[in-house]
Image (tube, grey):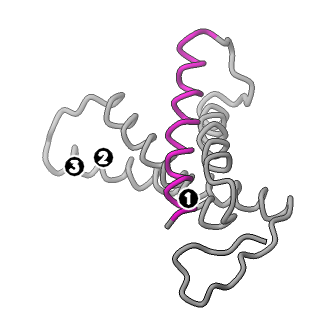
Amino acid sequence: MARRIGNTSNELAPQATIATFVWSIVRGIAYSGAVAICGAILVSLVQLIGGWRIEWGSVFQIFSYLSMATGGFMAARSSQRHGWLVGGLVGMLFILAMNWITSGSVVLPDMNPDTVLRLGMGFIVGAAGGMIGVNL
C-alpha cells in the first residue's frame, strides 16, 4: 500500500482497481470538455463584446491544451496513482473525442506527421497535468 504524501495523518491511499482507473479517465475527459466549452464561450463573449478580430485557431488551441491539462489534473486527483499515464490518456482521448464531435468519426482519417504531433502533444500536456494532480 502506498502512503499519501503531504498528509499529516499518514493514512493509506485507497486501493486502485480497473474501475477506478477507467472512471478517473472518464471524469477527466468530462472536465476537459467542460473547460473547452467555457473557453469557447469566453472567447466568443470577448469577441462579441469587445468587437475584436481573434484568430480562432490559435486561441482555441490554447484552450484545448488548457482543457487537456485540467482533465489530466482532475483524473489524476481521482485515481491518485499513475498520474502521467492517466493524464496522458485523457489528453489523447480528448483529441479523439473532439474529432468524433466535429467530424462524426472516432477514427482519424490519416496518420500524417501533423496528426501524430497533435496526439503526442495531447499526451504530454495531459501527462503534465496528471503529474501535477497526483502530487498535490
Q: Which mark is residue 69?
A: none
Label 2: element kind? helix
Which quadrant of the rendered structure holds the N terminus?
A: bottom right
Structural crowding at the residue carrying mark 1, measured as other residues with C-alpha within 10 Å and reported as few (<14), some (14–19) or many (≥20): many
Q: Earlier in the sequence, mark 1 or mark 3?
A: 1
Residue type at the position of mark 2: Ser
- Residue with the mark numbered 2: 44
Is 38 left, or right, of 102 in this rendering? left
Dot 3 and dot 2 residues touching (CB under 8 Å) = yes
Furthest-right residue in this view:
18
Asked if the magenta segment contains residue 117, the reply would be: yes
Q: Position of residue 76 (x, y in %)?
A: 61, 59
- Residue with the mark numbered 3: 46
Q: Residue at 73% of width from left, 30% of height from top? A: 106
Q: Earlier in the sequence, mark 2 or mark 1?
A: 1
Q: Position of residue 109 (x, y in %)?
A: 69, 15
Label 3: element kind? helix
Residue type at the position of mark 3: Val
Against 116, is 54 above or below? below
Against 122, is 114 above or below? above
Residue type at the position of mark 1: Tyr
Tell me which segment is drawn in magenta: 112-135
Is 106 left, or right, of 74 in this rendering? right
